[in-house]
Image (cartoon, helix red, strand yellow):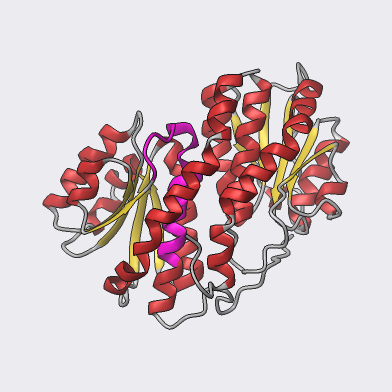
Amino acid sequence: MKPENPSILKNEIYQQPLVVKELLEKEEKNIQKIAASLAGKFQYIVIAARGTSDNAGVYAQYLFGYFNHYQVALATPSLYTYYQSPPGLKGALVIGISQSGQSPDIVSVLTEARKQGCPTLALVNDETSPLAQSCDAIISLHAAPEKAVAATKSYTAALAALAALSCAISHDETRFQELLQLPEKMQATIELGEVIASLAERYRYMEHCAVIGRGFSYTTAFEVALKIKELSSVIAEPYSSADFRHGPIATAIPGFPVVLIAPTGVVNEDISELHVELRRRKVEEIIISNDEQLLEEAQTPLPIAQSVPEWLSPLVSVIPGQLFAMNLALVKGMNPDQPDGLTKITSTR
């Protein structure tokens, strides 16, 4: 059910199922054509992105690594701009991911890649942007103008585009059919998230927290932490559950807020073991999951739809995180549509 008088950001969060559905319908043939044109032309993948789009690149590392067996690296744009010493990219497919396609440092990576003879691809919401013009091929995100400063629908659209490309490269129709069912799961999760507004008040005075995920959920930990930072000015640090154990767990004192990204899947056992340790330490747990036992034991349970394949769970589990960050901003008296000091297009070099 769509809320009455939504803010711009809330409206865009609610648009995500439709955006993903439209992207898959309109870009399926284009993505298949791109995948066919790339056959045998690359040995690994380099992702050039910033901010939210960089988090989509983390998803690509797990996605293409697990299903397509390609090593995926994240580009270091400063080598191309300030240091003017770009690395050799022989054998790489270079993908630029951007909502606006305006950032000069991302464009510089793709321009150099093309100069070195690499195949290049842009996942972008503006097909007329400098990034789109610098690439051999484009996958349009079909997210329409994103008016809120914090990116939401362009992020999940980028994840869906990457997932569809992975399916096309491996000619995996079964996985693509799972992807086509995702908008329904996203919508169900949005409806479950109606309660989040009443839960956020508990965290009005929160100043810092950890956000933890692993495997395919690692990208969600980074994106939810970014949304919390952008919208509420809370210092939110993302970790894998493994890295958190290697030192940062010392911060897990009684009452310390921890957001656990815990959809069911291969790494669920590891996350559950960490949850047991966090309970022992009496931390404040906010758990995003479809695991009933974990949700029952959380101080703040944020449920997602059932029966979501682990490899697609980032498109679903990010939604409660987006809604939590937005409502946290509201209870802190902040404007989630226009966070202080941020602009929609950030141009870096």
Whether residue 221 is visible here, answered yes or no, is no
Quarter of the figure with residue 200: bottom left
Residue 23 lies in the magenta stretch: no
x 62%, y 69%: residue: 148
x 46%, y 66%: residue: 229
In the figure, 99 relative to 4: above or below?
above
**Which residue occupies the foreground of this view, 180 or 97?**
180
**Where does the image place residue 100, in percent across and percent down from the top left?**
74, 58
Whether residue 331 is visible here, answered yes or no, is yes
**Where does the image place residue 328, in percent across and percent down from the top left?**
39, 71
**Where does the image place residue 154, in percent across and percent down from the top left?**
64, 53
x 56%, y 68%: residue: 9
- Please state if 80 lies on the left or on the right of 262 as rendered: right
x 88%, y 48%: residue: 133
Q: Which residue lies furthest to the left in this view?
A: 280
- Please state if 49 lies on the left or on the right of 26 as rendered: left
Q: Which residue lies furthest to the bottom in this view?
A: 333
- Please state if 157 lies on the left or on the right of 271 as rendered: right
Q: Where is the C terminus found, in terms of image quarters? A: bottom right
**Which residue occupies the foreground of this view, 215 or 116?**
215
Q: How many labels does the image show?
A: 0
Residue 314 lies in the magenta stretch: yes
Question: Which region of the structure is painted magenta?
Answer: 305-325
Magenta-drawn stretch, dominant element (helix, strand or loop): helix
- Please state if 180 lies on the left or on the right of 218 as rendered: right
**Where does the image place residue 266, in percent across and percent down from the top left?**
35, 28
**Which residue occupies the foreground of this view, 312 or 213?**
312
Quarter of the figure with residue 313: top left
